[in-house]
Image: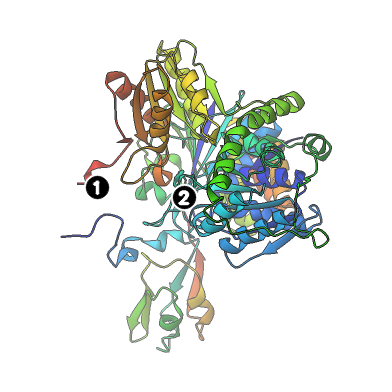
């Protein structure tokens, strides 16, 4: 049913459809509305889950770890400092191969304190071993939750999934969303059947000590599982399209990329504005297209390289960067292309940090800069007088 | 596509006004989008909210820089910040005020319209909260969205007597501005 | 040498923020029955009522119109009136 709702409600409705057993979260802007809605749904008896209030994000992550280990379907949501506070447990959830789903309402990292959107939080824990998906709009965020549990709970994958949606820009935006019915959701997402779970009748230990003789093997298997998840993520997207007719790409998506001499690359809600900018530029005869990275971990290097093979120039727009190093997407895309004969000219831009708005005109400026010459790690719309 | 920017102060319901407009447009069968300017919420601080309405799906998510319509909830903002920026020449600026548009002498080619929304809200709703009244006024002044859709959105958002009163204020302001003022 | 941007701020920023524009109602001090009790001065949450010798007035640049002074005035010498815009 099509409803006019807030992005946070679109997420809460989707989580409800996934029939979680345990929800645990600690409120933090701009994630708060998601868990407020869920807490209300649990209190109203619409969701048959335990909503476990905790003292911190560390507690919330620990609760969903335990719930998943006990064989339950578990959900949490957080952002920014909350995700950092979860940090230790985030790595453990992945290492224990527990298919928890966490929604991150992406926000910058302090200091200075800033509650607005960028991708610094997700990028800070990118090496934790989670499957990391980025939603373009609230419909995709809604639909992604069903796909996320399906992917993560696939027995041979058994990994947690982080759904990233831009804080405020998506979480607080109201728009029309097709809310899936419970019946349809149930036919897409089967109940969670873990191969092994904590059970007093069949006791096991989870959270074991791995000595040097086999720690490396455990990490190797995690790495393999992440790579093996790529076809599973693609299949989930195809299955979803087959059932619901909606398609957002699988690990990547492309827009008007045929014959494009210049291709923008980005993740998240910026894709929408970029599509409009691409249409405007195409309308003026500019050969420009767009590559959307939908799945950041596992990193779809081969798919990206293949999509960019006929392109002259690439403009990578990043909402985070590695302090003291470079743009994260930029470096990883360059590394992916290094394994191929393709050598497009790559320009990298940092944009929208700490919630700075990204007007369509700024995108057009970026395009003109890229067309003039290659650019490295340019802060878009920087107030140069403030950094003298 | 029609773009609307609402300027108010924290607590005046600028975000709710945007959501009501977009919700009503959605119920009129249009595509719509509403979002706040994402400040850290403080009563009284200048805030903005944004609405887009279109016949096609809306993809862009930048703020509204060249609005077709402006709603000014608090005219003291006119001297505090440049609320008129980007307003289209054939656009419309709606201000809550007892004054006439001429008294504001605004530097814009767009049409300026005033409506005593706070007074209407005080009289009809019993409280000086005029966001719903202004939404009705915009519908009346522009015809962008039907008054029925707005009243339904208002009643859904505020169930019971308070919703009925707000819907009444919507109608009063709509009637006042319909057909020009 | 100043510290880098974003690492500190200077005091006094609330002076620049003239919160008087938030008002929907305005306290008018009638200067009629005032007894110099100074309760209005004490209860004003913004500390912006000043005066002496039975003549007190708020600083309208910062008065948010909360109405506490009018409510607490023991001799009803403060009246709240709508702020006409």
Q: On the rendered structure, is A311 left or right of A222?
A: left
Rendered position, A305 above or below A155: above
Q: Is residue A370 visible?
A: yes
The residue pinned by badge 1 equals A386
- The answer to which image quadrant residue A2 occupies is top right
Of all chains, the one bearing label 1 is A
- SS class of the residue under badge 2? strand
**Same-chain check, marks 2 and 1:** no
Q: Is residue B86 visible?
A: no
Tags 2 and 1 in contact by the CB under 8 Å rule? no
- The answer to which image quadrant residue C50 occupies is bottom left
Q: On the rendered structure, is C5 left or right of A317?
A: left
Where does the N terminus of chain A fall, quadrant-wise?
Answer: top right
Who is closer to the viewer here, A27 or B94? A27
Where residue A279 sits: x, y (%)?
Answer: 48, 18
The residue pinned by badge 2 equals B47
Where residue A37 sits: x, y (%)?
Answer: 69, 53
- SS class of the residue under badge 1? helix
Of all chains, the one bearing label 2 is B
Label at residue B107: none
Who is closer to the viewer here, C65 or C80? C65
Who is closer to the viewer here, B97 or B148? B148
Image coloring type: rainbow
Counting the numbered discs, the total is: 2
Judged by depth in the image, the label closer to the viewer, 2 or 1, is 1
């Amino acid at each position: 049913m099509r409803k006019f709702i807030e992005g946070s409600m679109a997420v809460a409705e989707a989580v409800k459809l996934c029939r979680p057993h345990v929800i645990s979260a600690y409120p933090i802007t701009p994630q708060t509305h998601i868990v407020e809605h869920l807490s209300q749904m649990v209190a109203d008896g619409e969701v048959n889950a335990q909503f476990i209030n905790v003292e911190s994000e560390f507690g919330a992550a620990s609760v969903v770890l335990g719930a998943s280990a006990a064989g339950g379907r578990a959900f949490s949501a957080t952002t920014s400092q909350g995700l950092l506070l979860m940090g230790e447990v985030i790595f453990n959830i992945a290492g224990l191969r527990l298919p928890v789903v966490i929604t991150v309402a992406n926000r910058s990292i302090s200091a200075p304190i800033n509650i607005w959107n960028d991708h610094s939080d997700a990028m800070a824990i990118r090496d934790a071993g989670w499957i990391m998906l980025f939603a373009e709009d609230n419909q995709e965020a809604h639909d992604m939750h069903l796909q996320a549990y399906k992917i993560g709970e696939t027995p041979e994958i058994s990994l947690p999934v982080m759904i990233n949606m831009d804080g405020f820009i998506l979480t607080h935006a109201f728009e029309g969303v097709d809310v899936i019915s419970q019946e349809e959701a149930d036919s897409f997402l089967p109940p969670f059947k873990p191969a092994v779970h904590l059970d007093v009748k069949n006791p096991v230990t989870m959270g074991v000590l791995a000595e040097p003789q086999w720690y490396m093997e455990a990490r190797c298997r995690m790495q393999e599982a992440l790579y093996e998840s790529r076809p599973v993520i693609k299949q989930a997207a195809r299955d979803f399209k087959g059932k619901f007719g909606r398609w957002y790409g699988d690990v990547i998506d492309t827009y008007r990329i045929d014959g494009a001499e210049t291709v923008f690359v980005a993740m998240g809600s910026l894709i929408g504005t970029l599509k409009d900018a691409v249409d405007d530029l195409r309308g003026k005869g500019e050969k420009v297209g767009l590559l959307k990275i939908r799945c950041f971990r596992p990193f779809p290097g081969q798919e990206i390289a293949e999509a960019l093979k006929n392109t002259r120039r690439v403009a990578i727009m990043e909402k985070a960067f590695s302090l003291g190093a470079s743009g994260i997407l930029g470096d990883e895309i360059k590394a992916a292309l290094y394994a191929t004969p393709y050598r497009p000219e790559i320009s990298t831009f940092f944009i929208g940090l700490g919630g700075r708005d990204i007007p369509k005109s700024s995108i057009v400026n970026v395009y003109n800069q890229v067309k003039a010459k290659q650019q490295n790690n340019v802060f878009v719309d920087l107030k140069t007088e403030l950094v003298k | 596509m029609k773009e609307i920017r609402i300027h108010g102060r924290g607590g005046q319901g600028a975000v709710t006004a945007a959501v009501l407009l977009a919700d009503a447009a959605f119920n009129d069968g249009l595509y719509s989008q509403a979002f706040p300017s994402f400040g850290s919420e403080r009563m009284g601080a200048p805030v903005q909210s944004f609405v887009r309405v279109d016949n096609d799906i809306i993809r862009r998510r930048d703020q509204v820089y060249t609005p077709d319509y402006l709603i000014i909830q608090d005219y003291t903002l006119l001297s505090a910040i440049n609320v008129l920026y980007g307003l289209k020449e054939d656009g419309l600026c709606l201000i809550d005020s007892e004054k006439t548009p001429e008294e504001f002498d605004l530097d814009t080619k767009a049409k300026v319209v005033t409506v005593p929304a706070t007074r209407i809200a005080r009289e009809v709703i019993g409280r000086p909260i005029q966001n719903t009244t202004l939404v009705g006024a915009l519908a009346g002044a522009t015809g962008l969205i039907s008054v029925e859709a707005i009243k339904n959105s208002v009643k859904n958002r505020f169930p019971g007597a308070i919703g009925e009163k707000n819907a009444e204020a919507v109608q009063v302001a709509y009637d006042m501005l319909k057909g020009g003022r | 040498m100043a510290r880098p941007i974003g690492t500190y701020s200077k005091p006094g920023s609330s002076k620049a923020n003239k919160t008087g524009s938030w008002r929907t109602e305005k306290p008018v001090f009638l200067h009629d029955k005032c007894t110099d009790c100074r309760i209005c001065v004490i209860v004003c949450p913004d500390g912006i009522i000043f005066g002496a010798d039975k003549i007190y007035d708020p600083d309208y640049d910062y008065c948010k119109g909360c109405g506490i002074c009018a409510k607490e005035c023991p001799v009803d010498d403060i009246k709240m009136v709508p702020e006409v815009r």
